Amino acid sequence: MAKRFIDTQKYHKPFIRSLPGAYKLLWDFILCECDHAGIWIVDFEIARIYLGSDMIIDKDEALRLFNADEKRIVEIDSGKKWFISSFIDFQYGKLNIENRAHNSVIHQLEKYNLKINKPLRSPLQGAKDKDKDKDKDKDKDMNKDIFDLARKFYPGTKRGLDTEFKNFIKHSDWKICMPLLYPAIEKQKKFRNKLFSESKFIPEWKHFKTWINQRCWEDELNEINYQKVSNNRGIPMTQKEMIEKQKMRQHLGF
């Protein structure tokens, strides 16, 4: 038993609402009885049996009603078959010759020289695409939140979140590096604190953009070149002098 998509809003549309009851039922019957390419072998005798003897239907009247405001039914094979013009768009979307499931449909259309213009995406594919987009948006927002924690934690000069994040994702491996940022900044802060306690030279923090571009989260702290902090007299600073010096350094983050 074949399963097909159905428009749950179809009875809200003027076309369906305008049809007499018997022809509403006939339209649904044709949609169910047509083949996978939307082609129905015209047989009103069988249709009347299935719809019921109280459903009075006529072929010419059906064509008139179905095609009243647009071409919904195309007669092919000398009128022996009807093609539902909207069937392909609704059930499949844009046909792809590389899709094996579409090959027989394409063959049927070519057999009767039927062309589908302005193909639409099927409801299922559209829903899948929307879900994918939502997932991508969620992932992007989550990554941004993680990145922003590191950006805010960084003591040096920095720009806005969107600008800094856009710069960061230029790295091809940014998703792998993302969780390394915050711990690296934390480690570097601790290392600077250690230098401070030992009266060692402490360079100012780089601009966050530079820190990102130079991949400073990969720095080996034991390789940092530092020297004794001294005053202009060449004498090691007292604790008081060092504190005053540190107050002048606005970007050290202590």
Image (tube, grey):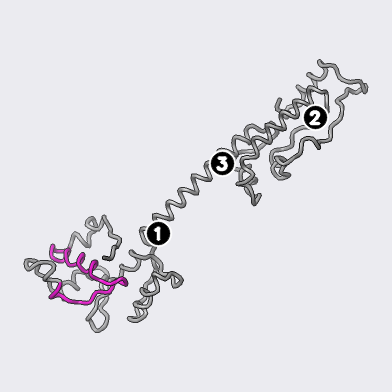
Residue type (three-letter) at the residue carrying disc 2: Ile
Separation of residues labelled 2 and 1 (CA atoms): 57 Å
Residue drawn at 33 percent across, 64 percent down = 91
Label ID, residue 47: none
Residue drawn at 31 percent across, 68 percent down = 87
Quick one: 167 or 65, which is closer to the camera? 167
Percent across and percent down for residue 47 are: 15, 71
In the picture shown, does residue 189 fall above or below 126?
above
Residue under label 3, please give it: 144
Percent across and percent down for residue 49 are: 11, 70
Separation of residues labelled 1 and 3 (CA atoms): 28 Å
User: Which corner quadrant of the image does residue 179 belong to?
Assistant: top right
Q: Earlier in the sequence, mark 1 or mark 3?
A: 1
Residue reaching furthest front?
Answer: 1
In the picture shown, does residue 132 fall above or below 217?
below
Q: Earlier in the sequence, mark 2 or mark 3?
A: 3
- Please give left or right for residue 153 compared with residue 4 in the image: right
Residue type (three-letter) at the residue carrying disc 3: Lys
Residue drawn at 75 percent across, 25 percent down = 193
> Quarter of the image containing the C terminus?
top right
